[in-house]
Amino acid sequence: MSTVNNNSSVLAIGIDAAESTVVRQMIEHDEMPALRSLLAEGQWLVVRSPAPIGSGAVWPTFLTGEDPTVHGIYSEWKWLPETMSLGRYEGRHLTPFWQSLAQQGVSIGVFDVPFAPPVGITSGFEVCEWWAHDCTAAGLRAGPDEIRSLVRASPTHPLSANRFFTATPHSKDNLEALAGACCTGVRLRGSLARRLISNTNPQLSVVVFPEIHHASHQLWHTIAGNHPIYGVLERNGTSVKGLLKEVYRAIDEQIGKLISSSSAETVMVFALHGMRPALGFPGFLGPLLCERGFAKLANWRSQTWSKRTMSLFAATKRRAPARLRKLYYQVTPITTTYKLARPTMLPTYDWPNTRAFALPTDQYGWIRINLMGREGQGIVRLDEYDRLCNELDQMLSTLTSEEGELLVHNIVRTAANAEEARGNPLPDLVVHWKDAALASAMKIKGSKVQAQGVSQKSTGQHASEGFCIYRGGRGVDGIVEARELGRLIAESR
């Protein structure tokens, strides 16, 4: 890390999951004047991140400067090989890059950086989960004491009371309500961020707007309605066209106000990954691995009574009407929903007869090898690892619908070989699906597995490329790695 320079300051603004192609288009059409002005004075950088592994990997990589194989985070949930179970992300083992700066006496301001744990900043401010798309069970945390009081006295985000707000693609009213809540939240966030910076005057500020991430998952079809994947949706015509752009414009307005009110010499606006059209995601990978003999579910007799209870609860929740599920999420405290969800997210496997299994996901297919010496009940020998990965790769790469359309775009391996896999905390294989795999009526050729899509209210999923608009004194190449972005922020002082 370079020597601290107390005579300059940095303002870094994240737009979580903002799509670079949309931002460039809106800049060119003067729909984002603040970013247009910033770009005129700075440069456009492509940000490469570990988004192909999973969206949950990008922010931990940014804030620690480490690759996912080191920090181990790829989702809000993490596989625990010792207990053969899932654990909720809490972030206590992560060290954000700004912690060492704070220890050097640099005043730091941090506002809602996703996945970032509080580090006890005393000069400046830190606010975690004022409102977050990706949140832990810890809830709102803020400091120092005067900042905590300021934040608690401020208006709350309109989505705070209902984090699980659902806007179905067919409902104009729901879509407009979501867009409106996100825009209002953006304005409140911008106002609070300006007040925090004004009150504490930090030398380095990192402020993140997560509203684009939340809105894009349910509003992407409002800016890409002609994409073939949306053919099964009822057309809302022009009545919902551009709703998502309203959120982009609201963020641009707040960015302009933040820059105008700041004395920072270096300003950067960035997104670590983007968005693209989708319609939910495939939910058939786990059953398919069972059908093809890679995994086996435990039968009723072999389960403990606690496992049987959880299995019944999971089945009841899956079959409950949508309105009842919505009410459940509204009235149940978030900490309770996480505790109840954890044991129901993974089926009960017969581990002695399971070589590979699917982990819960929100986009890609994640496969973990039941590796001996790594998994608590592992059965696959180290010398069998590569052969099993190749077998899975071959099976998935040739998977087609009954119409002959390939279902898999590509498969990412997170460990280069069996030796690397021994300490690998990530899924071993990451399956990237083709659009054909998302079709609601799709049938898999040669399979009896029901290929029903999951979470089809989601009309947007993540694209891998991010961007950064950088205005500062450093010369930067046209591409920056997400793990190096924190270093760039720190060394731009």
Image (cartoon, rainbow, N blue to C red):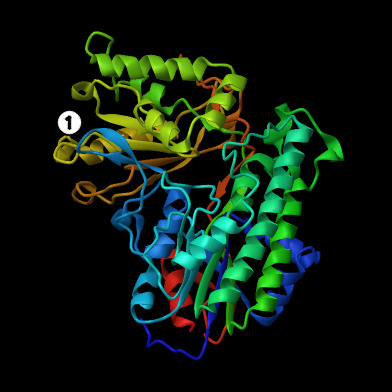
Left or right: 70, with 252 as reference point: left
Q: Residue lying furthest right in this view?
A: 238
Q: Is residue 430 above or below residue 356?
A: below
Q: Which residue is rendered at x = 54% and y = 22% of the image?
A: 452
Residue 250 percent coordinates (x, y): 73, 58
Q: Residue lying furthest top in this view?
A: 301
Q: Which residue is rendered at x = 85% and y = 40% of the image?
A: 238
Residue 442 percent coordinates (x, y): 58, 22
Closer to the camera, 135 or 219? 135
Would residue 486 be visible to someone looking at this image? yes
Crowding around mark 1 (Cα neighbors within 10 Å: few <14, some 14 to 19, many 20+) is some
Q: Is residue 170 above or below residue 267?
A: above
Q: Quadrant of residue 403?
A: top right
Left or right: 461, with 169 as reference point: left
Would residue 446 be visible to someone looking at this image? no
Which element is circle 1 on?
loop
Q: Which residue is rendered at x = 49% and y = 30% of the image?
A: 332
Say what amino acid the circle numbered 1 marks: Gln
Q: Quadrant of residue 340?
A: top left
Closer to the camera, 101 or 23? 101
Left or right: 437, with 414 as reference point: right
Q: Quadrant of residue 386?
A: top left
Which quarter of the rendering shows the N terminus? bottom left
Mark 1, residue position:
377
Give the number of marks.
1
Residue 310 percent coordinates (x, y): 35, 19
Q: Which residue is rendered at x = 61% and y = 27% of the image?
A: 439
Closer to the camera, 247 or 386? 247
Q: Is residue 487 above or below residue 446?
A: below
